[in-house]
Each structure stands twice: as C-alpha cells, then as structure tokens.
Image: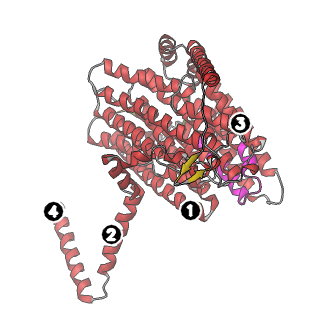
Amino acid sequence: MLSGIEYFLLISIILPFFTGLLVLVIPTEIKFLREIIASVTLVALFIMAGLLGIAPEQQLFSGFFSSDGLASFIFFFILFFGAINLIYAFGSEAGKSRLNEFYAYFLWTLGAAAGVVFSANMIAFLSFWGFLGLTLYMMIGLDGEAASGPAKKTILIVGGADALLILGFALLFLLNLPEQLADTTQIFSGNMGLWIEQPVTGPYAVLAFILLTMAAFSKAGAMPLHTWVPAASSDARPVTAAFLPGSLDKLLGIYFLYRICTKIFVMPEDSWMVTYLMVIGAVTIIGAVMMALVQHRIRRLLGYHAVSQVGYMILGIATLTPIGMAGGLFHMLNNAIYKSCLFLCAGNVETATGTDELDKLGGLGKFMPLTFLSMLIASAAISGVPPLNGFVSKWLIYRGLIQVGESGGLSWIVWLTAAMFGSALTLASFIKIIHSIFWSTPSCRIPLEKVKEQSYFRTIPVLILAGICLVFGIAYIYPLFLYVGSAIGELPRLVGMELYRDWHAGGATVLLVIALLIGLFVYWISGLFSRLRRVPTWVGGSQHDPERAYFPGTEFYRTIQRLPVISSLYGYQSRGFFDIYELGSRFSVGVASYFSNLHSGVLSTYVTWALVGLVVYLFVFLGIW
C-alpha cells in the first residue's frame, strides 16, 4: 500500500509523461488544446511540489526515491522556470511547426527532472538522467537542419558524459558491495543506493568521484564539457535556450554536484579533490567570459556567459563551508533567473529585428523600452552589481573563499581573484551588449519603423524575472528561502548571521540611489553651463554626415584579440583545440581513416595482420595464464 507522499511523487513523475504523450498524438488542427493541457499539467505539478515540500524527509518506494527539503526546493524552481518559459512559448511558438512535439518534449523534460531530483538509487537516477539527455537533444533539434549540428554535438557530449556516469556508479557499487551479496540478482536492491557517503580515499574512489563530477559538469556546462551550451544557445529556439541550458540544466547539474560532495562522497577539506574542483571553477569563469567578450551574436555570447557562471557555483560548493555552499546553490538559482531573462529578451530582439548580430543592431531602447529595462537589470545582476541578486550570491561565495583562507594556505587568493576578475569582465561584456542593442546609433541595416515591443506573453515573463532580480537582492530573503527549501542543518542560521553582519542591502540600496541621483544632477548642471561649438566634420575632403556615423558595439574589445598571448589562445580556440567535440571528431576520423587504408584488397596484407593479431592474442593470453 502506497503512502500519501508516494502518490504525490508518482503523480509528479508519471503525469507529465502521460500528458506529453497525449499532446503528441492530438490532431494539430485543434487549436489551444496542447497549451491548455500543458498549463493544467504545470498547475497539478505545482500542487504536488507543495505537498512534497511540507512532507517530512523520508525514503520512498523501498529506497529508490527520497524526499527532503532541498529536493523539493529544486523541484519547485524547476516548475517555476517551466511556467515562465511556457507563458513565453504561448507567444513565441504560436504558428510554428512541430508544436505537438515541442510541448510533448517540454512536459517529458519536467517529468524526467522530477525523477532526477528525487532519485536515491543509482538505477533510477541513471534512467531519468539519461532520458533528460534525449529530451535535450530533441528540443534543440526542433528547428530542423539549422539546429541539427548543435543537437548532435549536445547528445555526443552529454551522452558521452553519461557513459562516464555509468562507469562511476559501477565503481561505487563494487566498492560498497558486501562479499556475501556478490550475486548479481541483488543489483536492483537497496545496495544500489545513491546516498552512501563514500570516503574519497583510494584510487577507485577518486576515479569514481572524478567520473561523477564530469557528468555533473557536462549537464551544467562547465569546462571542458561546455561547448554544447553556446552551440545550442545560438541555434535552438530562444525559449528552448532559456529553459534548458539557461535554467533547468544548470539546476540539475549543480544539484547533482552538491549531492556528490555531500551525500555520495565525504571529502576532507584538505583533499586534493577540492583543488580539482577549484581549478575547474576558476578556469570555467575566466575562459568562458574571455570567449564571450569577442562574440558577435547575442545568444552565443549569452551561451558563453551561461558557462562562465557555472564556475562560481563550483567554487562555492568546493569551499565545503556553509556560507560558500549556500552561495553556490543560490548562485545556481540566481543564474537561472537572470539567464532566462536575458535569453528571452534576446528572443524578443531577434523577433523584432530579424537578426541577433550585434553589429546590425542599435538604438532599440526607445522602441522596446520594457525589453531594454528587463535586459539592463538582468545584465547588472549577472555582472554582480549591488544590490541585485547576482551580487548577493557572489558575495556569499567570496565569503566562503575567504573562510577557506582563514584555515591556512594562500591558494584561496587565486580562486577569489579569478572570481572577482570574472565579474569585471562580465560587466565589460554586458556594457558591450547593452550598447550594441539599445544605446548605440541606430543601424541602417534594420527598418526601425517596424521595431516594437512583443506581445504580452513575451513581455510579462521578462518583466517578472527582472523584478525577481531586484526583489531577491534588495529584500534579502535568502535565509528564509534556505530555511524553507533546504534540509542542510545549520545553514539557515549561519548564512543569516553572515549576511546581516557583512552586508546591509537596504542601506546600500539607498546610498546607490543617492549616488545615481547626484550623478544625474551633475550631468544636468554640466549641460546648462557648457558651451559646445558644433562644426561640420570633414573626412577625405568631403563633409561627413553625422547621422550616418555608426560605431558598432562589436568593436569594443577587438584589441583584446591582438594581445600577444591571448591572440594565440583565441586562434587555437577558433580551430577547435579547446572543443572536446572537435578533438574527438578529429581523433575518430583519423583512426577510421587509418584502418580504412588497411583495407587494400591485397590478400597477403590481410594474412599478415591476422598473424600479428594472433601473436598479440597468444602473448596476452599466456601472460594472464
């Protein structure tokens, strides 16, 4: 007999799969039915999330699943971002092809995400995690030939990492399998439990830890398994980019990384595995933001920033301190908020102008004021500008890194410097994007008379997300969220003490507003008393028309590409030397070509290789014997 909470969990997983299948087979001629089914499903899932959230922590279905505060917390926000993107899809996807498939994949993704979040068994986790890779591939590939390349890259990188995940779980299973239960009939029993708290000691445990973290990195989009994120972000539908690489995959990847470091393994603070995580986090921050600086397409630029922000989350979790881990988890949430806002704003701009090339845009601020305001707030939030939410979670991570330094050693200075330098470069990058789209001289390449704000379905979601960036930063409700949504001991009390001791959001907000008003007043006064003399500009003997002067924002940081060492790194990157997908493709093609050349059709060659193979086989066999 199932308990009430087991019914709630079962509904949360099965209902989206059932309604997704229903949406897939309904006639396309019936308008609005698929949207109604998706909306009703989300409402039902929100109810289930609330019921799961108030239930006590417990094991479900004989240990295959478990429910605790953190799992319910993550599941609620998965549904929240699903709802935001569903509203946006009502406006952006109307009239597009393959709508049945879009809504079916969307619902299946929610069901599989619920399974991942609540799984406490290796077999259950692998099943749902692998299915998410499949829905990710299908949603990215909805736009046909244009998105087939990014979809293939995604499934190969994420799927390849899933193979590492299987190997890591196999090692864990062997490490924890009692000798008397070596019978394979026990494989589906509680011996496949996920939360085993394995010490990271010995080569097999270390290898299992690395394999599992690589799977988490691929899902979240950390280096070196990151290249699917900018590819999918730039060529998939905007709502898909916002929902998957922008929010859901970050939530699941970092949630899994947190569980790896706290529930699957037990890591001492002085473990070199901590250094391994810190290096991955720092390299991800700096490497991805450097790539974002030189991008010319909006969504590709945002894709690299989606990668860069993952580095902060990894650094926070790697501190193993309450304040740092809380910062990593909340930066995961904050990133999903402002990154979804940025991707959806980029979708509005692309629809209004027909392009996402920065050097073809400009002067859209007065034509799309709501999109401009939302994107400005989200850009400031991702750059860590106080008092927005991005600053608060980064501040928690900085505090965690400083606490690591208090226990001895100087390596924390490197990680803190990388995090702060990354924030500065992020701000520089978003100055470029805001100027290029909204502030610069209007480009003659787009008909501005046709540019306007998008529908309410596409405008309201970005305003909601921008508003949350303000509320989460100014109202400072993180300890409340942590207390309600997390079951990680003393974190609420400790984090609350750290926050209110070191950062006063209300007072800082007042000071920042006063500084802004003073700056505007000085600007106004200087305009009253300045005596500017306007004269015509001459270029090459001809008078220059100032109305046609245009400085694209893409020129902001072009000089960076010419710096001695950095120019070489950019050159290597452009040739795919840092893309694991490109490297793997070249290696596989090279190996295939080599063996293809052996098929010469000459019988003596085949006999020679057969004899060589027989000798090698006998040598290995006799050596083992």
Disc 3 from disc 1: Cα separation: 33 Å
Whether residue 8 appears in this view of the structure is no
Q: Which residue is mark 2?
A: 591
**For the residues marked 4 and 3, what is the alpha-carbon distance in whole angstroms?**
73 Å
Q: Nearer the viewer, residue 71 or 277?
A: 277
Q: The residue under label 2 is which amino acid type?
A: Val
In the image, is residue 467 above or below residue 91?
above
Label drawn at residue 148: 1
Q: Mark 4 or mark 3: which is in front?
A: 3
Q: Which mark is residue 370?
A: 3
> Which residue: 49% across, 12% down?
497
Q: Residues within 10 Å of mark 3 (few under 14, many from 20)?
A: some
In this rendering, which labeled residue sits more in front, label 3 or label 2?
Answer: 3
Between marks 3 and 1 in the image, the one whose residue lies nearer the viewer: 3
What amino acid is at disc 4? Gly
Mark 1 belongs to which amino acid?
Answer: Ser
